Image: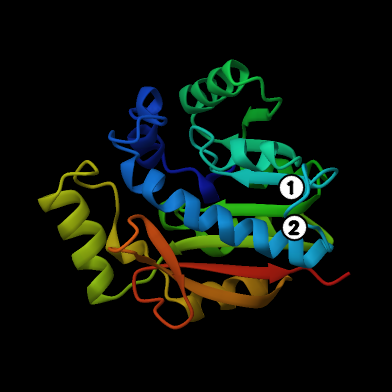
């Protein structure tokens, strides 16, 4: 597997979670809390770009979606339920096995593979939408990784990336709060020095050949629980959409 997106220590962290991906109170609890918000954003971006009616039975029918760093399938599965033809890749073989077993149990057909973005890009594969959610902060060379991700987007398609900003607030929330105090995640899950600012991420994406068209924050919603989208507050979690020119 190409080295730019493979860090053995990072893979081991998430392989250890293989049995807990679908436990909303387990180590993936923060992702479960964020998932409705990021799913709403992703579905809205795809529907808007491809002129789909989100109220339809299968609004993403016929669209090819790649979920890079799919983990246990928390985003791959709802994409499949919306009608997309989903491929999920992850460098962790145990993680992919757990994702596949869960999808089969739910009657979903998802093409899960233990593969890297670089290897898939070298094969010439292309997708209408490529998702790289909560992964860029875990790869050794984010610029090369994002170049590979951009290369996997078909002309006129979308790349959607979410990650953590490198700010004092993100250190307090994602590391001190989530790992040290609340212990939602094991210590060492995140390295604050690997977090990217929105401008850094946008620059890497555009260097890879895609044009950034939207960016929003994802912030805790204490009234309704979970997270909500924010137009201006990108200080901790944020998501960005880019389009590959047709």
Give the residue displayed 76% in from the left and 40% down from the top: 83
Q: Is residue 85 above or below residue 165?
A: above
Q: Secondary structure at mark 1?
A: helix
141 left or right of 177 in image? right
In this view, 120 is above or below 168: above
Rendered image quadrant of residue 111: top right
Extreme right residue here? 246
Residue of label 1: 121
- Callout 1 touching callout 2 (CB < 8 Å): yes
Colour scheme in use:
rainbow
Residue at 73% in and 46% down: 65
- Describe residue 34's horizontal placement relative to residue 106 as left or right: left
- The residue nearer to you, when weighing 20 against 57, is 57
Which callout, 1 or 2, points at the residue further toward the start of the chain?
Answer: 1
Q: Mark number for residue 151? A: 2
Residue 208 in sight:
no
- Label 2: element kind: helix
Nearer the observer, 108 or 186: 108
x, y percentage for residue 1? 59, 36
53 or 108, which is in the foreground? 53
- Residue 15 appears at what percent x and percent y? 39, 29
């Amino acid at each position: 597997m190409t080295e730019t997106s493979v860090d053995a220590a990072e893979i081991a962290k998430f392989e250890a979670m293989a049995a807990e991906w679908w436990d909303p109170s387990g180590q993936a609890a923060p992702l479960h809390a964020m998932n409705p918000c990021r799913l709403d954003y992703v579905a809205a971006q795809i529907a808007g770009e491809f002129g789909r009616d989100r109220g339809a039975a299968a609004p993403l029918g016929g669209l090819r979606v790649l979920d890079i760093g799919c983990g246990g399938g928390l985003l791959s599965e709802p994409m499949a339920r919306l009608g997309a033809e989903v491929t999920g890749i992850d460098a962790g073989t145990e993680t992919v096995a757990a994702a596949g077993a869960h999808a089969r149990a739910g009657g979903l057909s998802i093409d899960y593979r233990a593969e890297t973005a670089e290897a898939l890009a070298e094969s010439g594969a292309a997708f209408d939408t490529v998702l790289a959610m909560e992964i860029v902060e875990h790869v050794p060379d984010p610029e090369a990784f994002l170049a590979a991700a951009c290369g996997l987007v078909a002309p006129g398609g979308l790349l959607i990336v979410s990650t953590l900003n490198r700010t004092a607030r993100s250190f307090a929330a994602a590391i001190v709060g989530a790992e040290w105090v609340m212990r939602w995640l094991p210590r060492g899950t995140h390295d604050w020095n690997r977090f990217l600012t929105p401008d850094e991420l946008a620059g890497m994406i555009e260097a890879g050949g895609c044009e950034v068209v939207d960016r929003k924050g994802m912030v805790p919603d204490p009234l309704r629980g979970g997270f909500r989208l924010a137009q201006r507050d990108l200080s901790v979690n944020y998501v960005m959409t880019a389009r590959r020119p047709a």
